[in-house]
Image: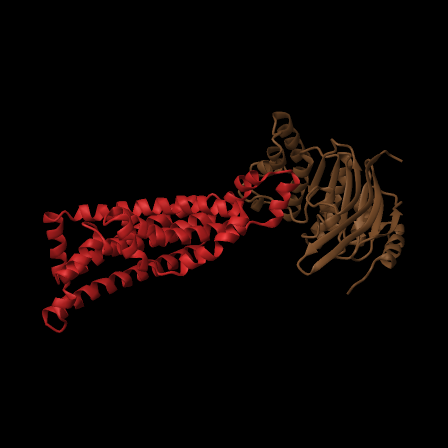
C-alpha cells in the first residue's frame, strides 16, 4: 500500500439553522493513500458535498480529526466549470495561480504545457463561450492542476454534461489524472461512473451520513471505457446497488 | 452571398426605410397641422402657441438671451449629478456588499428614501443648501443615487455562488473576490445603470431648476410660465426633448461599445 496522505477520524458535521440542528455527517473515518482514485458515492443530499467542503477548508468540521501534512496542497474541482466568461482560456486556467500570487513564468509555462497536452492549444486566447462543454471541463481541471495540488477533490465534475460528453470527459479526466500522477477523491451519485474510475469506493448512508462499506475495485483495463465493458463491471454494480440507500 | 440572402437583406433595409419615412411624416404632419389649426384660430395660440412662434422664440433666445448659456448650465448640472451619482452609487454598493451587516442595517432606510417622492424634500434642500446650483445637484443626486446603489448592489449579489466557491477554494480573500469576480461580473449591470442614471439625473436637474435657478432650461420653462409666455415654455420643452434624446443615444452608443467585448 502507498503511504497515507490523509487520515480522517470520527469526522462529524452539524449544521445550525433557525429550526434546529441538522447532523450532516456522523463519525466518518477513512484514510486516503497516495496516488489512489477514491470515489465516495451516496444518494443525493447525503452530505457528500459537505464532506468535500470540509476537506477543502471551505467549511468547518464540528468534531473529529483530519490528519494531514501541513504543506499538503488541495485542489478543488466543482460540478460546473465556473469559467469566467470575460477571461481567456489561459487567464481562466491561471486564475488559481493569480489568487495564490504564484503566477510565475514557470507556472504559466506549466499551464500552457497542460493546455497543449490536452488539446486546447488553439484555444489559449479564446473565450469560454467558444468552447464545447467537454473542453470547458478540461480547462476547469487544468485550472485546478495548475496549482500543483497533492490531492484533487472532484465534486460530481461531470454531472452538468450530457451523457456522451460525460463518458468522453470522464475518460479524459482519468487519463489526465493518471498521467499527472494525482491522488483523487471524487464524489458522485452515479455508480457506473464511480466503478469505471475508482480504485476504491466508499458508500455513504443517507443523512446523517455514515460509512456503510468500502470496496476495493479490481477491474482490468485502465481506461474508463474499457472498464465499462468488463464483466466484473456489472458484478460491482450489483454489489453497490444493493448497498445504496434509495430514497425515491 | 446567395440570391435569397440578398433578397432578405433588401427586404430588411426596405422595412427600415419605410419606418423612418413614416416617423418623419408623423412629425412633419403634426407640426403642419398644429400651425394650420393655430392660424385658423381653431386652437388657442395663447395656450398652445404655434410652431412658427416657437421657432421665432428660439432664434430670439439664441441671439439675445444666450440660449447656449442656458443649455450649457443644464448640461453641466446633469453631468455633475450623473458622475457623482455613478461614483457614489458604485462606492456605496461596494460597501454594502463587502459588509452585509451594514446592508442589513440600512436596508429599511434605503427602501424608505427610495419610495419617498424626492420633490417633497425640495423646499428643505433649498433652506439647507441655499438657493443655488448646490441645491439642484443635491436634488438630482437624491433622485439618481438610491436607484444607482440598488441597481449596482443587485448586480453584485447576483454573482454566481459557484464562482465565489471556486475562488475561495483557491484561498481568495474578500477583496480578491470583489475585484477579480464580483465587479467584472457586474460589468453589464453597471453599464446599464448608466442609462437609468442619465434619465434620473435629467429629471432631478430640471426639478431642481424649477425650484431654484437663475439659468438653465428648467429656469426658461418656469420663467415662461410665470410671464405667460407659452412660446418660451414650448421652446424649453423642445430643447429638453432634444437634449434627452441626444444624451440617451450617446449613452446607448457608449453602452454598445463597452459591452461589445463579450
Residue at the front extreme of this rendering? B127
Q: Nearer the viewer, residue B100 or B81?
A: B100
Figure check: B46 above or below B244: below
Q: Position of residue A247 (x, y in %)?
A: 79, 63
Residue at position x 38%, y 60% in the image: B116
Residue lying at the far bottom in this picture: please name it. Answer: B42
Q: Is residue A143 visible?
A: yes
> How many marks can you see?
0
Image coordinates of residue A17 in percent, x first then y, are: 68, 57
Res A206 → quadrant = bottom right
**Which chain is the one coloured brown?**
A
Q: Residue at x 81, y 62 (%)?
A: A246
Q: Is residue B117 above or below residue B260?
A: below
Tell me where residue B22 appears, x and y as whole percent. 28, 63
Kindly indicate the quadrant of the structure image that contains residue A242.
bottom right
In the picture provided, is B94 more to the left or to the right than A184? left
Rendered hue of chain B is red
Residue A197 visible in the snapshot: no
- Locate residue A186 relative to residue A134 in the image: left or right: right
Classify A239 as above or below A131: below
Horizontally, residue B203 falls left or right of residue A125, namely left
Name the residue located 76 percent from the left edge and 46 percent from the top edge: A186
Q: Does residue B238 sit above or below A218 in this rendering?
A: below
The location of residue A116, given as percent across then percent down, is 65, 34
Q: How is the image coloured?
A: by chain
Amino acid at each position: 500500500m502507498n503511504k497515507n496522505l490523509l487520515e480522517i477520524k470520527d469526522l462529524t458535521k452539524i449544521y445550525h439553522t433557525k429550526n434546529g440542528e441538522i447532523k450532516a455527517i456522523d463519525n466518518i473515518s477513512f484514510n486516503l493513500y497516495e496516488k489512489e482514485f477514491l470515489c465516495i458515492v451516496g444518494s443525493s443530499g447525503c452530505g457528500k458535498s459537505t464532506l468535500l467542503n470540509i476537506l477543502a477548508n471551505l467549511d468547518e468540521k464540528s468534531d473529529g480529526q483530519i490528519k494531514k501534512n501541513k504543506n499538503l496542497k488541495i485542489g478543488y474541482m466543482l460540478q460546473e466549470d465556473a469559467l469566467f466568461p470575460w477571461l481567456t482560456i489561459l487567464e481562466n486556467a491561471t486564475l488559481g495561480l493569480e489568487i495564490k500570487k504564484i503566477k510565475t513564468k514557470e507556472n504559466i509555462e506549466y499551464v500552457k504545457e497542460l493546455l497543449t497536452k490536452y488539446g486546447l492549444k488553439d484555444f489559449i486566447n479564446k473565450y469560454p463561450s467558444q468552447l464545447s462543454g467537454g473542453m470547458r471541463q478540461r480547462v476547469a481541471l487544468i485550472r485546478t492542476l495548475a496549482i500543483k495540488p497533492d490531492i484533487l477533490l472532484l465534486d460530481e465534475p461531470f454531472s452538468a454534461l450530457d451523457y456522451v460528453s460525460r463518458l468522453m470527459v470522464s475518460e479524459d479526466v482519468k487519463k489526465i489524472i493518471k498521467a499527472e500522477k494525482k491522488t483523487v477523491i471524487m464524489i458522485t451519485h452515479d455508480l457506473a461512473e464511480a466503478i469505471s474510475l475508482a480504485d476504491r469506493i466508499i458508500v455513504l448512508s443517507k443523512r446523517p451520513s455514515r460509512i456503510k462499506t468500502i470496496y476495493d475495485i479490481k477491474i482490468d483495463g485502465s481506461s474508463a471505457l474499457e472498464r465499462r465493458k468488463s464483466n466484473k463491471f456489472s458484478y460491482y454494480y450489483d454489489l453497490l446497488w444493493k448497498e445504496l440507500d434509495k430514497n425515491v | 452571398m446567395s440570391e435569397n440572402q440578398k433578397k432578405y437583406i433588401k427586404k430588411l433595409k426596405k422595412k427600415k426605410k419605410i419606418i423612418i419615412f413614416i416617423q418623419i411624416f408623423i412629425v412633419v404632419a403634426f407640426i403642419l397641422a398644429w400651425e394650420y389649426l393655430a392660424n385658423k384660430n381653431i386652437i388657442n395660440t395663447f395656450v398652445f402657441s404655434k410652431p412658427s412662434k416657437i421657432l421665432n422664440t428660439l432664434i430670439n433666445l439664441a441671439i439675445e438671451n444666450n440660449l447656449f448659456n442656458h443649455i450649457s448650465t443644464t448640461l453641466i448640472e446633469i453631468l455633475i449629478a450623473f458622475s457623482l451619482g455613478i461614483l457614489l452609487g458604485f462606492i456605496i454598493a461596494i460597501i454594502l456588499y463587502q459588509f452585509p451587516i451594514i446592508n442589513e442595517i440600512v436596508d429599511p432606510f434605503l427602501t424608505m428614501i427610495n419610495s419617498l417622492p424626492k420633490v417633497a424634500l425640495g423646499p428643505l434642500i433649498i433652506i439647507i443648501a441655499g438657493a443655488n446650483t448646490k441645491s439642484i445637484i443635491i436634488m438630482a443626486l437624491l433622485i439618481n443615487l438610491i436607484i444607482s446603489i440598488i441597481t449596482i448592489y443587485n448586480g453584485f449579489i447576483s454573482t454566481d455562488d459557484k464562482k465565489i466557491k471556486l475562488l475561495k477554494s483557491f484561498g481568495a480573500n474578500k477583496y480578491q473576490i470583489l475585484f477579480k469576480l464580483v465587479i467584472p461580473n457586474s460589468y453589464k449591470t453597471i453599464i446599464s445603470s448608466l442609462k437609468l442614471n442619465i434619465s434620473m439625473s435629467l429629471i432631478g436637474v430640471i426639478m431642481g431648476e424649477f425650484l431654484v435657478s437663475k439659468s438653465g432650461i428648467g429656469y426658461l420653462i418656469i420663467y415662461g410660465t410665470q410671464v405667460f409666455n407659452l412660446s418660451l415654455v414650448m421652446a424649453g420643452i423642445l430643447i429638453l426633448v432634444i437634449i434627452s434624446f441626444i444624451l440617451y443615444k450617446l449613452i446607448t452608443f457608449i453602452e454598445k461599445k463597452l459591452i461589445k467585448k463579450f
